[in-house]
Image: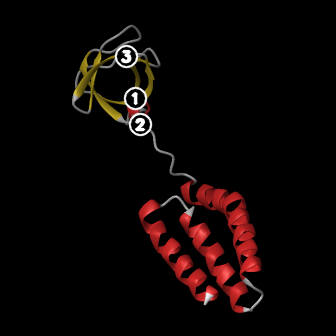
């Protein structure tokens, strides 16, 4: 009977992971499934609970961080002004080493040229850096 309870608990925790997505519930679910296996061997509820605790601790402390690193590698999100770096812009008023204006998306930004070239209105440029409220741009896309 205890093995059935561990089994149901494990399946419910693994299923609940779909809602959380943080890899904690799935680790607890796998630990509960392991405890179900231990309990099914007839060693008693105390040893099944110990097996659950050891497996849960090992999975959360060991497997979870490695799994999260592997699944999120290369998917770092950029936000705010850093999301603009590397993107295109259109010169609105002549941009040189001292100033000018560009349109990034729907917004007009003050800008300056990275390589001190003069960029004429209508030219497509690439945002290389955001320095304060100024977009540092260079010609080309």
The residue tagged with tag 1: helix, strand or loop? helix
Q: Is residue 124 above or below residue 95?
A: below
Secondary structure at numbered mark 2: loop
Which quarter shows the C terminus? top left
Determine contact: label 2, label 1, CB under 8 Å: no
> In 3D space, how far apart are the residues under numbered discs 3 and 2 (Cα atoms)?
16 Å
Quarter residue 71 falls in? bottom right
Residue shown at 75% from the left, 77% from the top: 46
Give residue 125's position: percent from left, percent from top: 35, 29
Residue sticking out furthest to the top: 98
Relative side of 33 to 130, left or right: right
Q: Which mark is residue 5?
A: none
Q: Name which residue lies at 69% across and 73% down.
A: 52
Task: Decide: few, some or many residues near mark 2? Use Cα within 10 Å; few <14, some 14-19, many ≥20.
Answer: few
Q: 65 or 98: nearer the eye? A: 65
Quadrant for residue 83, please give it: top left
Which disc number belongs to residue 81?
Answer: 1
Up-down relation of residue 102 to residue 84 (above or below): above
Image marks 3 and 2: residues in contact by CB distance under 8 Å: no
Cα–Cα gap, marks 2 and 1 = 6 Å
Which colour assignment does the render follow?
Answer: secondary structure
Location of the N terminus (image quadrant): bottom right
Q: Secondary structure at mark 3?
A: loop
Task: Give me the C-alpha separation between circle 3 and circle 1.
Answer: 9 Å
Specify which label sits upstream in the sequence, 3 or 2: 2
- Residue 53, image x, y percentages: 71, 68
Mark 3 or 2: the one toward you: 2
Q: Quadrant of residue 48?
A: bottom right
**Residue marked by disc 3:** 133
Residue ID for mark 2: 79
Q: Residues within 10 Å of mark 1 (few under 14, many from 20)?
A: few
Relative to 103, say whether 55 is above or below.
below
């Amino acid at each position: 009977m205890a093995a059935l309870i561990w089994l149901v608990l494990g399946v419910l925790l693994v299923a609940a992971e779909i809602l959380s997505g943080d890899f904690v519930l799935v680790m607890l679910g796998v630990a509960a499934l392991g405890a179900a296996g231990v309990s099914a061997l007839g060693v008693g509820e105390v040893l099944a609970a110990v097996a659950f605790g050891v497996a849960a601790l090992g999975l959360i402390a060991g497997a979870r961080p490695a799994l999260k690193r592997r699944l999120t590698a290369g998917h770092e999100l950029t936000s705010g002004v850093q999301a603009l770096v590397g993107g295109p812009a259109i010169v609105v008023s002549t941009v040189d080493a001292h100033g000018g204006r560009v349109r990034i998306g729907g917004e007009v930004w003050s800008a300056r040229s990275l390589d001190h070239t003069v960029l004429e209105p209508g030219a497509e440029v690439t945002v290389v850096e955001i320095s304060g409220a100024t977009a540092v741009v260079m010609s080309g896309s």
